[in-house]
Image: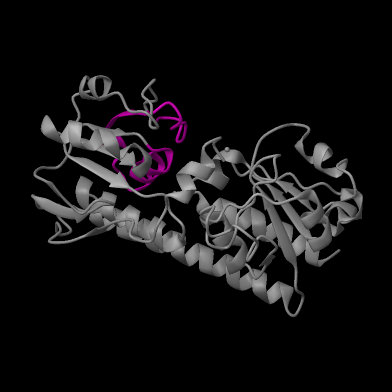
Amino acid sequence: MRIARFTTAAALPAVLVLSACGGSDSGGSEGSADAGGAYPVTVNDARGEVTVDAEPERIVSLSPSSTEMLFAIGAGDQVAAVDEHSDYPEEAPTTGLSGFTPNVEAITEEDPDLVVMSQDAEGAADQLESVGVPVLVLEAATAFDDTYEQLETLGEATGHAEEADAEAERIRDEIEKITTETREALGDTELSVYHEVDDSLYSATSDTFIGQVYSELGLENIADGTEGAAESGGYPQLSPEFVVEEDPDLVFLGYPGGDAVDDLETRPAFDTVTAVENGDIVQLDQDISSRWGPRVVDLVQSVSDAVIAAQED
């Protein structure tokens, strides 16, 4: 039996919370800096307009996706501190700061002139702004366009507009290349997919970021249209019976665990599922599959590799 375990890089335990709050209005620039980084610059975040008066020299990033973006656009030298989960790239100055429950006092001790945080933690934004610290609140992405927009927003805010535009274009081009090649390889073959967020059978529809990866590659998502999908923010909990009945051709696991694949295979009746029979079970790297930064290209490529392998079964 061929078991595919692609190591592209971890969904955090809070992936349901992070992703459910995502939306398409994830940021943008307005009255923005030119290519030379003229200030002040005004950008849009999840709450509205934010004006950054001068190029930030000490950035605190409280979102792993934002941290990866900042380093990818050349603003890494300006990053003074990041949250406890921002473990990539290796040179990121990881601290004990929490991105989920920000401690305003601990953040201000880093003497930041810009703080980037997720929408889940925006309650701390007003407190930080009351002491004169500009804050960018970025939503969880639900589409590739959100990644591109957030890169551009961070580029404008940090003085790296050109680098951010180039990085967004690179990611866009590489994803388009992978998806085109995958669809060509599939031809008329129709494959279905089941994404498992955790072992309690929470899944992800095409309205989520990871779900868009599958849909762009031409896969039919068994979670789409299930009862409660909309109310769950695109993360419905499925029953074992439903998964077995839908008989997906591919299964992707978005959580860690050395026995995760074996545990799924030994569930009652799961040995009749096509993906299990053919060994087309993919354990995704938890970080890459739950973040929407530059490494989304690695995620798309790993899914593409699995799709093509399943098509050849």
Q: Does the segment drawn in magenta span residue 237?
A: no
Asked if residue 81 shows in the view, the reply is yes
Image position, residue 199 (x, y; %): 71, 39
Q: Does the segment drawn in magenta span residue 82?
A: yes
Residue 197, above or below 216: above
Image quarter of residue 82: top left
Q: Residue at x 22, y 45 (%)?
A: 158
Residue 138, above or below 286: below
- Quick one: quadrant of the C terminus? bottom right
Taking 281 as reference, is 271 left or right?
right
Count of numbered circles on the image: 0
Taking 132 as reference, is 256 left or right?
right
Image position, residue 8 (x, y; %): 61, 44
Model colouring: one colour
Image position, residue 78 (x, y; %): 25, 35
Q: Nearer the viewer, residue 75 or 18?
A: 18
Q: Nearer the viewer, residue 165 or 81?
A: 81
Residue 254, above or below 242: above
Image quarter of residue 10: top right
Q: Residue at x 65, y 53 (%)?
A: 302
Asked if residue 292 shows in the view, the reply is no
Image position, residue 97 (x, y; %): 36, 24
Write the start and end of the magenta stretch as one range. 63-92
